[in-house]
Amino acid sequence: MSELDTESLCDQGRELLQKKDLQGAAAVFKSVVEVDPDCCDAHEGLATCAYMSGDYAGAIAEFQKLTLLQPMESRYYTNLGAIHNRIGEHMKAADFLRKAIQRNKKCAESYYNLGIAQRKLKQNSMAVSAYKEALKIDPMMVEAYQNLGNVFVDMGNLQMAILNFKKALEIRPEFERARVGLEKAEEQLAAAKSKNSAIGRLSAMESTVTTVMGVSTRELRDDERYEDRKCVKKLADEIERLAKGCVEHLRQNLIPAVLEVERAMAHGADEVFVLAEAAQAFKNASTQWTALRRTLKKKVAELADHEQFINAPNTTT
C-alpha cells in the first residue's frame, strides 16, 4: 500500500468517525494497520474509535503503541492521562500527564487533566497550581475556572471559589455546573456568616459582598510559580514519606507491642516479668508513634501555610 493510499484510507476512516460510524471507521483503520503497523494516524483513529465506544482498555493500548512510535509526542500522554482519569486510575493519570508536560510545557489540556488527577488524589495545593498553569496558557478555558472553584470549595476557601465560578460564567453564561457551584459556594459562605454573626465576628452583609467582589487572585511571576511547584512537590514527597513511615511503624512495632501486652496479661501474675517487658516495649513504640505523628502533622501544617500564602487574595488596589 502506497503512502497516498494509506492517507486516503485514513481520511475515509476520519469521515466515518465524524458520522459516528465507529465500526466502519475501525475496520478502515485496522486495514491500514495490517499493511502498515507503524501508521500513527491509523493507530490514533483506532484509539478514538475505542474511546468513543467505551472500550477504554482498547484506547489505552493504542495510545501506548503511539508513545512507542512517537515517544516525544506529548498529546498521546495527555490522552492516556485523560482516559486513566475517566476510569478512576488517578495515580497513573498523573504519571502520564507529567510525562506530557515534560514534552510540551505549553499544553493547557495537560495541566487541566493533571489538576483533575491531583484533586482526586487529595493534592489540592498541587491541583490549584496545575489549573493556574492551564489558565495561564489558555485564559478562556472555562472548565479550568469551574474546576478550580471546586478545589477551593474543598479547601474551604469559599471567596476564591466564588471568584472562579463567576469567572467561568463570565466566559460562558449558560455553564450550568459553574452556576450550581456558585450557588452552593454562596450558600455555604452565607451559612458561615450566619453561624458566626451572633458573636459579632462578621461585618454587615452589604460590606461583605463588596469585599468578596473586590478580591482578586495574586498573580505569580514565572520564577515564583516555579518555586511554588518545587516547594509543594518537596512538601508532598515528605508528607508521603512520613505517612508511609507511620503506617510501617504501626504495622511493624506498635500493633505487635499491643498484642504482646495482651498475651502477657493473659498469663497473669506468673509472667510478671514478661508483662513488664511487654509494657516497656509498648511504651517505646508508642513514644516513637507520637513523634512520627507530630512530625507528619507539622509537615501538613507547612503545606497548608504555603497554600494559604500562595493563594492569598490580592488586596492591593
Image: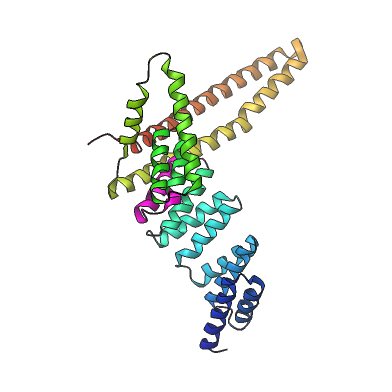
Q: In this view, does 198 lie to the left or right of 6?
A: left
- Residue bounds of the magenta highlight: 122-144
Q: Is residue 123 magenta?
A: yes
Determine the residue positioned at 62% across, 79% down: 28
Locate the N terminus and report the quarter of the image it occupies. bottom right
Q: Residue 114 location in percent, x, y? A: 47, 51
Q: In the displayed structure, would residue 171 be above or below residue 281?
A: below
Q: Residue 251 location in percent, x, y? A: 63, 32
Locate the C terminus and report the quarter of the image it occupies. top left
Q: Which of 185 and 229 is in front in this view?
A: 185
Q: Which of 206 and 129 is in front in this view?
A: 206
Q: Does the magenta stretch include residue 128?
A: yes
Whether residue 123 is visible, yes or no, is no
What type of secondary structure mainly makes up the magenta span? helix
Q: Which residue lies furthest to the left in this view?
A: 317
Q: Residue 280 location in percent, x, y? A: 61, 18
Whether residue 172 is visible, yes or no, is yes
Q: In the displayed structure, would residue 285 be above or below residue 9?
A: above
